[in-house]
Image: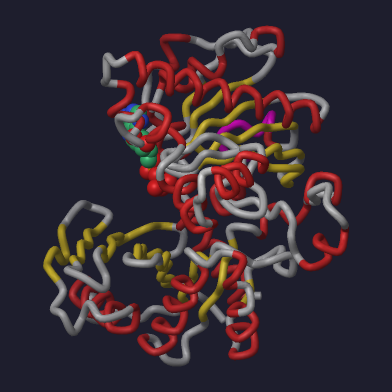
Amino acid sequence: MTIETILVLNAGSSSIKFQLFKGEESVLSGQIDGLGASAWIKGKSAEGVTIMDRALSEEEAQNHNTALQVILALLKEFDPNLEVDAIGHRVVHGSSKYSAPVLVTEEVAAELETFNPLAPLHNPHNLAGIAGAKAAFPGKPNVACFDTAFHRTQEFKNEAYAIPTKYYDEGIRRYGMHGQSFHYIAEELHNVAPEVANGKVVVAHLGNGASMCAIENGKSVTTTMGFTPVDGLAMGTRSGLIDPGVIFYLIENKGMSAKEVANLLNKESGMKGLSGISQDMRDLENSDSPDAKRALDYYDNRIKRELGALVAVMGGLDAIVFTGGIGENSSQTRAGVCKGLEFLGVEIDEEANKARAKEAITISKGSSKVKVMAIPTNEEAMIARQTRAICEA
Ligand code: ADP
């Protein structure tokens, strides 16, 4: 089956992001926000022409199904003769079973529902997006592309927690996330830095959520996120790595419920909790407050600690790649992380590091043993690529 036009959907709890691809090229993108309340749709072509920018009616904003009808109308407005050949979906969790994307049959859809407890904040919405797309595009193939799939190459020693293995067997494992982004960067390195593409690379995906991945020969060796996205680095509002003893203490001595602790660690911690100012990196970089400076220093230091661990596990380092909103744009974070890493062979070119990575940039000196780059990620392009591969197989 030849696939020309692919719609990529990323359905969240109250939003649906969408992007339309013709071949490898993105021709249209947009999103619906505020589902369930006062929702709004925005969509524009790759040339920047606004196709739709309006509120949804109460009826349209009811659920993912009704919202998808509005996306359908937007697509028709963009191109009245448009035929969507396949739909690629971001699905956060594929459990230990899926190490690759899968065509969503009735059977697969039922199976994916059983993964909901692994990612209760994400997977049910991703699946609602799939159900909605089935109704909106009858007969067209839907492909689930998992955030966790890329990390299924991890060996037991990197994937297991040191608790009785019956829990590992039941699925309590370090799954890792941001797989689409890491996979995209691993492939992109063949275009922009082929000399390191098959080497030992640490990729730091730094957005509101953040994780790092040790990639060797294009495959994930290990990653900083674990069973859930709260593990690893300090993030916008998530704590990252924390002694589980803190959780017991909060419950037993501070009278907090499990739900309250989950809320604390997911929504009130990270940069927001540390700075007391904002979760947004731009706010912190623009602030003169010593609390903001201390939080930023903490952020860089956590990345550095994980970098050390990832490099040690790989037994070497050929390149570091920064990506995500912070990795692509914050020269301050990149400089802060790389400062003091000369012993590893990292030499940063301060001038080159001032640039924003609108496309791949190299920020290390020519003499640097380790190549350091900032590369814009493109998770949607990766989903479109995988969807095409599955449908054309
Ligand atoms: P998400 O994980 O939601 O996809 P992004 O990858 O877009 O998020 O990253 C959002 C983060 O990127 C925010 O903390 C934001 O402050 C940061 N960011 C965006 N632009 C800049 C910039 N020019 N300088 C520093 N940080 C930036």
Number of dots carrying numbers: 0
Picture quarter with the N terminus: bottom right
Coloration mode? secondary structure
Closer to us: 348 or 280: 280
Q: Tell me residue 264's x, y (percent).
A: 46, 46
Image: magenta residue range: 190-196
Residue 384 in picture, x, y percent from top left: 49, 63
Instruction: Judge from the rendering whether residue 274 lies leftward or rightward of residue 300; answer left or right.
Output: left
Q: Position of residue 366 (x, y in %)?
A: 59, 11
Q: Is residue 287 above or below residue 124?
A: above
Q: Quadrant of residue 100?
A: bottom right
Asked if one can make out residue 189 in the rendered structure from this viewpoint, the answer is no
Q: Nearer the viewer, residue 372 or 97?
A: 97
Q: Residue at x 27, y 14 (%)?
A: 288
296 lies left or right of 218: left
Q: Is residue 349 magenta?
A: no
Q: Residue at x 49, y 76 (%)?
A: 127
40 relative position to 375: left or right: left
Is 65 placed above or below 39 here?
below
User: Measured from the top left, where is residue 7 in percent x and y?
Assistant: 40, 70
Chief secondary structure of the magenta portion: helix
- Relative height, residue 267 to residue 349 (above, below): below
Residue positioned 71% across, 23% down in the render: 308
The C terminus lies in quadrant: bottom right
The residue closer to the viewer here, 306 or 238, is: 238
Q: Is residue 314 visible?
A: yes
Image position of 271 with respect to 371: above or below: below
